[in-house]
Image: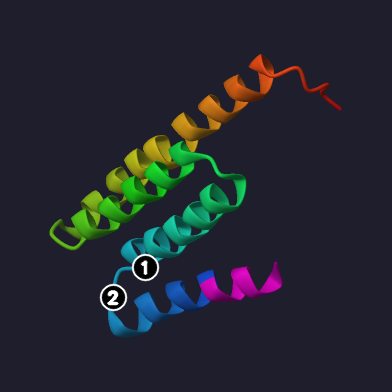
Amino acid sequence: MAGIRHLYGACYSLGSQKRLFPVPIILVLTGFATFMSGIILSFKPLVFGAAAIWAGALWCLFLSPGQHLLVQAASAVFGYLLPGYLLNHQMRESNVPRP
């Protein structure tokens, strides 16, 4: 867990030193983690959510830095919230007892 925090911190420091904006880098890393979660859980909406996050990272390359946070918010909705709600619904529909 500490390694992930260091990786995100390195992205922010790289952005401040080289005048690169960290949002596309953060979205690529977040998309990779979401993709791996989708593969491990065998849950396709997480894989599609990762693709949405990666698409947001590509989209950020063509936008001004002021618009990056809007794309990051939209990527969070389509990459995290929608797959999370679907996963919660699937768990509630199954007969697995909740802790």
Establish if 85 lies above or below 35: above
Establish if 84 lies above or below 3: above
Question: Which span is picked out in magenta?
Answer: 1-7
Please indicate whether residue 31 sits to the left or right of residue 68 in the image. right
Percent position (x, y) of residue 21?
A: 30, 69
Q: Amino acid at mark 2?
A: Leu
Residue drawn at x 47%, y 54% as measured from the top left: 35
Given contact means CB atoms under 8 Å apart, are the residues at marks 2 and 1 in contact? yes
Q: Amino acid at mark 1?
A: Ile
Among the 4 quarters of the image, the one containing residue 78: top left
| Furthest residue in direction left, as rendered | 62
Please indicate whether residue 96 sits to the left or right of residue 28 in the image. right
Secondary structure character of the magenta stretch overall: helix
The residue where tag 1 is placed is: 25
Please count the marks in the image.
2
Percent position (x, y) of residue 69?
A: 32, 49
Instruction: Pick the quarter of the image with the C terminus.
Output: top right
Please indicate whether residue 20 sits to the left or right of residue 76 in the image. left
Percent position (x, y) of residue 8?
A: 52, 69
Please indicate whether residue 1 sits to the left or right of residue 23 in the image. right
Marks 2 and 1, how far apart at CA: 9 Å
Residue drawn at x 36%, y 75% as measured from the top left: 15
Percent position (x, y) of residue 4?
A: 61, 69
- The local secondary structure at tag 1 comes to helix
Establish if 67 lies above or below 28: above
Tell me, what colour scheme is on the image? rainbow
Q: Residues within 10 Å of mark 2 (few under 14, many from 20)?
A: some
**Mark sitting earlier along the chain (2/1):** 2
Q: Which mark is residue 20?
A: 2
